[in-house]
Amino acid sequence: MKYQSFIGLEVHIHLLTRTKAFCGCKAAFGDEPNTNVCPVCMGYPGVLPALNAEAVRMAALVARALNCELSARTWFERKQYFYPDMPKNYQISQFASPVGVGGYVDIPVAAEGDGLAGDGSGPAGSGPAVSGGRTKRIRIKECHLEEDAGKMIHAGNVSLVDYNRAGTSLLEIVTEPDFETGAEAETYIQQLRRTVRYLGVCDGNMEEGSLRCDANVSINLRGAGLGPKVEIKNLNSSRFVRLGLEYEIARQIALAEKGGVVRQETRLWNENRDQTETMRSKEDSHDYRFFPEPDLPAFEPDAAFISGVEAGLVELPFDRERRLALEYGLGEEQASALCEERAFADYYESAVSAARALGVDGAVAAERVAIWMAGDLRRVLNRDGLGTADVGSLRVTSVRLAAIVALVAAGRISAKIARQVFDAVLAEGSEPADVVAARGWEMVVDPAAIAAAVEAALAAEPAAFSEAAAALARGDAARVKPLSAYLVGKSIAASGGKAEPGLVKAALEARLAAVSRAL
């Protein structure tokens, strides 16, 4: 391609602290406007901020999960600017000393040729843009902690401000300009959302603003380095991130092709028109007049703090996907679906482990639990308006699902009956074995009972039995097969639907063989 694109993302996440970053006001979404405010977050003269320790811990946890190095000494600055939703006219943020620096994440990338720079020649240190299960490395410049602004509500000619969000703990994750396509950026946002949810530090609800993204994008002739930077705001979904970047890259290329100049500016994504629009000229860091926050001392993490952060790390979704695929023999899509939420992946591994403990073959347990979770379990969650993170609220616990799998594997119930057992356990919260016993659903495996059911079917279908025996005698397997299947079904029906199909088939075949030899 003639042009190369450079994309860097700034993702803001609301940390799930009970209170705000520098005061004791409740941090909650959806409360009555302007009820969670106090003199500190409203910027009254003479007030003193106090740093939220849990916000610092969560920020450090995310930084370490993104392979950043924690700063040995970090402090806050005042970022000066005037907006109606920032009552102090400055934001307490970090500029010179972020919580963490110099990290990276690996993301799966699209097939070669998908996007502007499909040949994989990205910025220095970005890793190869490849497909087939391989990855591209995205460098994390820094993670810095700050307070959020309030929320503006525009209604016609009237603008309202809700300050409930002002002062909420906000972590900004800044990447290097290593993305080349909107699709790569979308993948990163989706992966980052899952990561912070796995860590339990953010709910990731982009529609509520608890995870927001700004994108910086430039284009230039291939090999010429970065071009003039344009920032895109108002990207409140991973899909809009992709669409906004694709539009902006195309806009800048078209402008360059006409001999125009790309201006450094801030643009908004208009989701109704599927285009970016000019918002204001782009500020530089000196425009904010940063200076150290005089009311907050520097923070120096000690060994106990760092040890606590390391202890809070968990296996992250992308790593877990790869492990589940390898350890349980799952396909990539299966593993990805199971790792959508930490609770869902935990449920899967717990159910497989429990099924194996009940004597189910390991590979069989892994496959059948995955099938149940992709089918009936998701059906129920969708029906009840729940997400996969809510799987733990169901009465069909992982251990109970394992028991159902074990009952089927042992031949005690059929696959059809298993679904009825599942629904009964879901409704009643009973143990699967108790449900089967109470309803008399266990399969008939007694040889005498099986033989009686076969004889009853043959007596009711003498013509079909005689024709099957004659076909077997003359070696007409093509004719025997459908007749045999028909008689197996009749035999199972004669048992009240409880006879074990494999045993019925064996008994019927033995009966047919005996008669055919006499012909």
Image (spheres, rainbow, N blue to C red):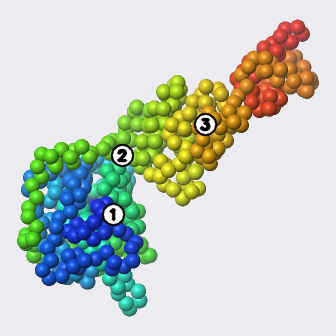
Which residue is more in the foreground, 480 or 158? 158
Q: Can see residue 211?
A: yes
- The x, y position of residue 107, in whole percent, is 32, 48
Q: CA distance from mark 2 to mark 3?
A: 31 Å
> Callout 2 environment at 10 Å: few (<14), some (14 to 19), or many (20+)?
many
Q: CA distance from mark 1 to mark 3?
A: 41 Å
Q: CA distance from mark 1 to mark 2?
A: 18 Å
As helix, strand or loop, the secondary structure at mark 2 comes to helix
As helix, strand or loop, the secondary structure at mark 1 comes to strand
Q: Which residue is mark 3?
A: 432
As helix, strand or loop, the secondary structure at mark 3 comes to helix
Looking at the image, which residue is at 58% across and 50% down? 379
- The x, y position of residue 248, in whole percent, is 32, 69
As drawn, 110 above or below 231: above
Looking at the image, which residue is at 42% across and 47% down? 343
Mark 1 touches mark 3? (CB < 8 Å): no
Disc 1 versus disc 3: nearer the observer: 3
- The x, y position of residue 22, in whole percent, is 20, 68
Q: Amino acid at mark 3?
A: Pro
Image quadrant in which you'd find residue 164: bottom left
- The x, y position of residue 172, in whole percent, is 23, 62
Q: Amino acid at mark 1?
A: Leu
> Callout 1 environment at 10 Å: few (<14), some (14 to 19), or many (20+)?
many
Mark 1 touches mark 2? (CB < 8 Å): no
Q: Amino acid at mark 2?
A: Pro
As drawn, 155 above or below 504: below
Q: Which residue is mark 2?
A: 317
| Screen quadrant of the C terminus | top right
Looking at the image, which residue is at 59% across and 56% down? 383
Q: Which residue is mark 1?
A: 211
Which residue is more in the foreground, 123 or 326? 326
Upstream in the sequence, badge 2 or badge 3? 2
